[in-house]
Every structure is written in C-alpha cells, then in structure tokens.
Image: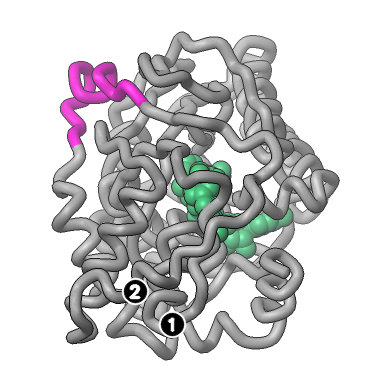
Amino acid sequence: MSKNILVTGGAGFIGSHVVRLLVNKYPKYHIINLDLLTYAGNLANLTDIEKKDNYTFIKADICDFEQMQELFKKYDIDTVIHLAAESHVDRSIKDPFTFAQTNVMGTLSLLQAAKHYWGDNYDEKLFYHVSTDEVYGSLGEEGYFLETTKYDPHSPYSASKASSDHFVRAFQDTYGMPTVISNCSNNYGPYQFPEKLIPLFINNIQNNKPLPVYGKGENVRDWLFVEDHARAIDIIFHEGKTGDTYNIGGFNEWKNIDLIKVMIKTVDRLLGREEGTSENLITYVTDRAGHDLRYAIDSTKLKDELGWEPSLQFEEGIEKTVKWYLENKDWMENITNGEYEKYYAEMYK
Ligand code: NAD
Ligand code: TYD
C-alpha cells in the first residue's frame, strides 16, 4: 500500500535515521521530509538517500500554519511522524520561549493543519508524535517510567514536550483524530549534534579539550542506539494501537561519570593512545539547574505487544558510534565552526 508520510524534523539526529529507514525499506511510500534546518538540522545527514524517487525535502517552519495547510494539500498527506522540535535541555534553560513556540505551538499548528485537511475522514490516517521520557520527571534510585507514570516535567524542554503530548491526546479525544505517542529514553549514535553529551565528549576527547561534567557526574540516563529507536518508530507507526502510548528504552542505565570513562577508554584505544590517558580531561563544572537525577524506561509493553527489543548491546553501540565520529571528521568540522564556537564559548565559559 502506498502512503504519503510527512516526517517533520527529518534533517535532525533521530529524524534522519527515521527518514533513511523509511525511504530504503518502503519504496512505495512517499517520504516528505519537512525541516526548518535550524542549527540542529543538517542535510549532510541524508546525502545517501537524497536522490531517491520516493523522497522529497521541504524547508519550512512547522509553526507556519498557512504553509502547513498548503503542504498537506499539495502532497496529499495521510500520515505524520512528528519529530521536529527544539531538543536540548541546556538551550531550553537559556531560551524557554523558543521551546514553547516550536514544541507547543508548532505541534498545534501541525495537528490543526492535519485536522483541516483530513476533515472528518480519518480512514488510514495517523498522527504519530515522537516524545521523550523526560516528561515523566526524575526517578530516585529505584523504579522505572511506565506508560502510566504521571507527567512531572522539570525543565522548560520537558515542560514543552509534555504540553505537546497533551495537545496530541486532546486532538484524539476531542476530534477523534487517530494518534499515537512514543516516549523514548536518551539516544546516541551517528549524526547527533555535538552539544549533547556523547558526541560532545567524543569530539573533546579527540581534540584534547576539557570534558565538562555537570555536578558530580552521578546523574543516570538510559541510553538507546538511535537505529533501534528508528526501528521502534517504524513498528509503532505500522502496528501501534491508535490512541496508545509506548515507552521506548534500552534497559541500559549509566551513571554519567561511568559512561564518560567508557567513552574515554574507547576513543583512546581507537586513536592508539594508552587507554585512560584522557581521564585527565575530566573537569567537574557547576551542575545544570534543575538537573533530573535519573531516567529509566520500562519498555515491556512495546516488547510484549509489538515484539520490539533493542538490537545492540551498549559496548557494541558505543564502539560503532565512536568509530563513526572518528571516521567522519568532515561532518563534525562542518558543524563545529562559526555559530557552534559561539555557543560553546557562552555555554562553558
Ligand atoms: P534534533 O535537535 O537533532 O533535531 C530536531 C530537528 O527539528 C532539526 O533538524 C531542526 O532543524 C528541526 N526543527 C526545529 N524547529 C523546527 C521548526 N520550527 N520547523 C521545522 N523543523 C524544525 O533532535 P533529535 O534529538 O533528533 O530529536 C527528535 C525528536 O525526538 C524530538 O521531538 C525530541 O524531543 C525527541 N526525542 C529525542 C531524544 C534524544 O535523545 N535525542 C530522546 C527522546 C525523544
Ligand atoms: P544530554 O545529552 O544533554 O541529554 P539530557 O539532558 O536530555 O539527558 O545530557 C546527558 C547527561 O549528561 C545529563 O545528565 C547532563 C550531562 N551532561 C554533562 O555532564 N556535561 C555536558 O556538557 C552535557 C552536554 C551533558
């Protein structure tokens, strides 16, 4: 069966993996990748598929409601996978307005454009919203986030994502729009913008730059290889129950400082340095404001109902990831000049 799928944020980190998977796996689907190409969007993430017949790129802002309406019509959009967002907690602390605008108003603009175009005929239609586990807040030493965990966001980023999730559910409940939401843990892998922990630290270790560890490095995150997230999105998109929520996670918790030491060992080894020599780059810095202590996802529902499981062990995933960044220096150099330097100087002064 053919579909016209609007993927938003497809030039970003996770979106580019989703676009690549769908374009290659489903030649009969038309994948329309809509992205504003903010600092986080990069068409170099998609050079391998950009010439495929079933792929179209559009540079546009999801907040532009008029344009969203035109695009639904022009491409006869029947399904949406919505990833476009401002996604970095540290930036949200400095500039919460942009997060409310893009993540809340942008999502609402897309929902409303879908509703206008689809009218009351929701046959074969779906609005899939990609969200984060950060909406659930912070865990103590014990326990996991379930799909039923009460929302308790703390950062402007997670508050804006929580709000967008609520709007998606409101469209399902009020207008009967078929929707599905997934909430995923921290992703890592190729093509991640080097402001997030893993690519930032790989790049700094390689360049012998200080590694700014927030607080005591004791915060815990549950890390999932990005291609496993893309695979989960594919499965939920096709087989997920309308109106439902699915948690996606790696059952792979790491204290930041332990994870950082694994990265140091891996980079040192692959660069032919004595393993662990770069530990002297570790620099403890002021903690992030409102820093959530621990995230950990229980993705049993996704496993039991739709058969999804992470495919990679963490050791394998981190090795693959470090190798990718070391082998793709041009990709990194192209995005770490100009604006990035300014961001870095301001953030870590
Ligand atoms: P990213 O920052 O790498 O990419 C976001 C993309 O959205 C960029 O390409 C950017 O250009 C685009 N964008 C931003 N504002 C836009 C606008 N107004 N109109 C159109 N496009 C716009 O983010 P990511 O890490 O790939 O995350 C993608 C989605 O997955 C987000 O919704 C995020 O909340 C969610 N998520 C991320 C993680 C993670 O660990 N990175 C985990 C769980 C959920
Ligand atoms: P990040 O990649 O920003 O993801 P999130 O905040 O969405 O979980 O950060 C992951 C963890 O690493 C988080 O606990 C904050 C910490 N961190 C640092 O210690 N130093 C850094 O420079 C960054 C970017 C993050």
Relative to residue 227, is residue 192 drawn left or right? right
* Stretch in magenta: 297-309
Label 1 sits on what residue type?
Asn
Quadrant of the frame with the C terminus: bottom right
Residue 182 magenta-highlighted: no
Residue 307 magenta-highlighted: yes
Q: Which residue is mark 1?
A: 208
Label 2 sits on what residue type?
Ser
Residue 40: image x %, image y %? 60, 66
Residue 113: image x %, image y %? 71, 39
Numbered mark located on residue 55 in the image: none
Q: Observer-nearest residue: 332 or 147? A: 332
Which residue is depicted at the point 54% across and 22% down? 136
Q: Which residue is mark 2?
A: 278
The furthest residue to the right? 97
Q: Observer-nearest residue: 264 or 299? A: 264
Which residue is depicted at the point 71% across and 75% down? 345
Q: Residues within 10 Å of mark 2 (few under 14, many from 20)?
A: many
Which residue is depicted at the point 60% across and 50% down? 87
Residue 102: image x %, image y %? 74, 47
